[in-house]
Amino acid sequence: MTFKIEKHRDGRGTTIRLIGRMRAENLSELEKQIKESESKIVLDLEELNLVDVEAVRFLGKCETQGITLHNCSPYIREWIGKERGYKNRSTRNV
């Protein structure tokens, strides 16, 4: 399966549903969709099956910028945490 983005707006915000396999080459389109959304943003990851390290870093960055990650699988959640830990350790060692 490839990667698919579905966007839904309602009175409370915008939900962007991510489906399939998200890789680095998909991030520019997702960034565009996020920038076009003027309201509160939720990324629904329920149908996101596979990610690469760049996608994980991007999702972590989104979360730190106030974007909600909904239905995030445990393996992606753990990986985001590990990437944040790596970043914090490398920053301290500089």
Image: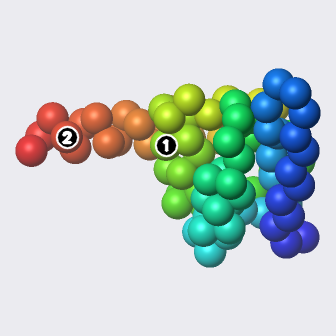
Instruction: Confirm whether residue 73 shows in the render.
Output: no
Q: 47 or 68, which is in the foreground?
A: 68
Q: Write the residue at 52% across / 60% down.
A: 54
Q: Write the residue at 54% across / 58% down.
A: 53
Query: Would you say 9 lies left or right of 30 here?
Result: right
Write down the residue under mark 2.
91
Query: Would you say 52 lies left or right of 48 here?
Result: left
Type of colouring: rainbow
**Circle 2: residue type:** Thr
Q: x and y percent of residue 88 in the render?
A: 28, 35
Check the image and report above or below for 17 versus 4: above
The image's mark for residue 61 is: 1
Q: Secondary structure at mark 2?
A: helix
Q: Secondary structure at mark 1?
A: helix
Check the image and report above or below for 76 versus 1: above
Direction top: furthest residue: 12
